């Protein structure tokens, strides 16, 4: 009987040791991140594969894509031109409504320029030059005839600078309506093709706010 019990203990010992080794190995894999090695990344990659096309270059580049870069690089000078136009209003406009609208445009678009500049710097992309001053180097002047919708040509900007009173008010509103319509078009493209959440949120805000301002300016012109 004693011999039988010894045989059982002798047989059970290796089994228990093997079981303990398995348990220790499993615990070590869970608790030590370094034990996963490349296999941890492979497992993550396999999981992400199930997402299909969503695992795009945008994800690899920090959540933004080429459209986001284009949006920021084009909207910055577009906004800069609007801000430059708005800066003419205090000394040239007759209507307080026009002056107030111009101030609102400048207040809204200056921070957006700074935000988009920050995105481009963080992404390592080129930031449009905004250091030029004066009509000959006015933001947007170099974009005459470009593909950016709503950008004013050189002659339009020079003409606006020379106007005052009612003539300025009418020209300002007409030009800014066209300018806003261009911005809305660009923002809708970003909404449809962009990948970077903050850029798409800004685009949505631009569509909403500038569409409302277009309606307001048309009413000021008596068109609605």
Image (tube, helix red, strand yellow):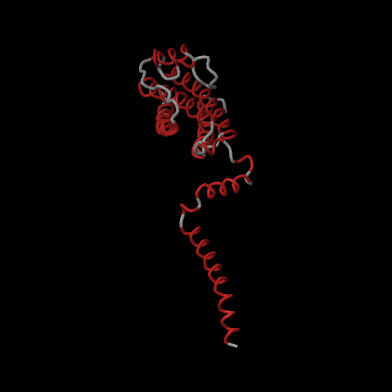
* Left or right relative to 193: residue 138: left
State the count of labels: 0
Q: Nearer the viewer, residue 81 or 38?
A: 38
Q: Is residue 102 above or below residue 22?
A: above
On the image, the x and y values in percent for residue 140 come to 45, 19
Give the quadrant of the C terminus.
top right
- Camera-nearest residue between 77 and 178: 77
- Quadrant of the rendering where the N terminus is positioned: bottom right
Q: Going by the picture, which residue comes out furthest to the bottom?
A: 1
Q: Which corner quadrant of the image does residue 91 belong to?
A: top left
User: Dividing the picture into quarters, in which one does residue 111 lie?
Assistant: top left
Residue 158 visible here: yes
In the image, residue 169 lies at what x, y percent?
A: 45, 21
Point 48% across, 18% down: residue: 171
132 versus 65 height, above or below: above
Residue 168 place in picture, x, y as percent = 43, 18
Residue drawn at x 50%, y 58% is: 29
Residue appearing at x 54%, y 30% in the figure = 67
Percent across and percent down for residue 53 are 63, 39
At x 59%, y 33%, the residue is 193
Residue 107 showing in the rendered view: no
């Amino acid at each position: 009987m004693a011999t039988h019990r010894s045989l059982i203990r002798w047989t059970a010992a290796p089994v228990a040791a093997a079981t303990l080794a398995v348990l220790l190995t499993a615990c070590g894999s869970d608790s030590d991140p370094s034990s996963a090695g490349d296999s941890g990344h492979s497992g993550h990659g396999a999981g992400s594969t199930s997402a299909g096309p969503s695992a795009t270059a945008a994800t690899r580049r920090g959540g933004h894509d080429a459209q986001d870069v284009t949006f920021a690089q084009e909207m910055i000078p577009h906004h800069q031109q609007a801000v430059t136009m708005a800066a003419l209003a205090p000394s040239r406009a007759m209507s307080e409504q026009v002056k107030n609208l111009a101030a609102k445009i400048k207040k809204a678009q200056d921070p957006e320029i700074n935000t988009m500049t920050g995105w481009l710097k963080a992404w390592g992309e080129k930031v449009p030059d905004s250091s030029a001053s004066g009509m000959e180097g006015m933001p947007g002047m170099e974009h005459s005839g470009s593909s950016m919708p709503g950008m004013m040509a050189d002659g339009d900007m020079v003409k606006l600078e020379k106007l005052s009173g009612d003539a300025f008010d009418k020209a300002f509103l007409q030009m800014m309506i066209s300018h806003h319509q261009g911005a809305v078009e660009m923002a809708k493209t970003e909404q449809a093709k962009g990948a970077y959440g903050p850029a798409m949120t800004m685009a949505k805000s631009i569509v909403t706010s500038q569409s409302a301002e277009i309606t307001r300016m048309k009413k000021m012109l008596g068109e609605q």
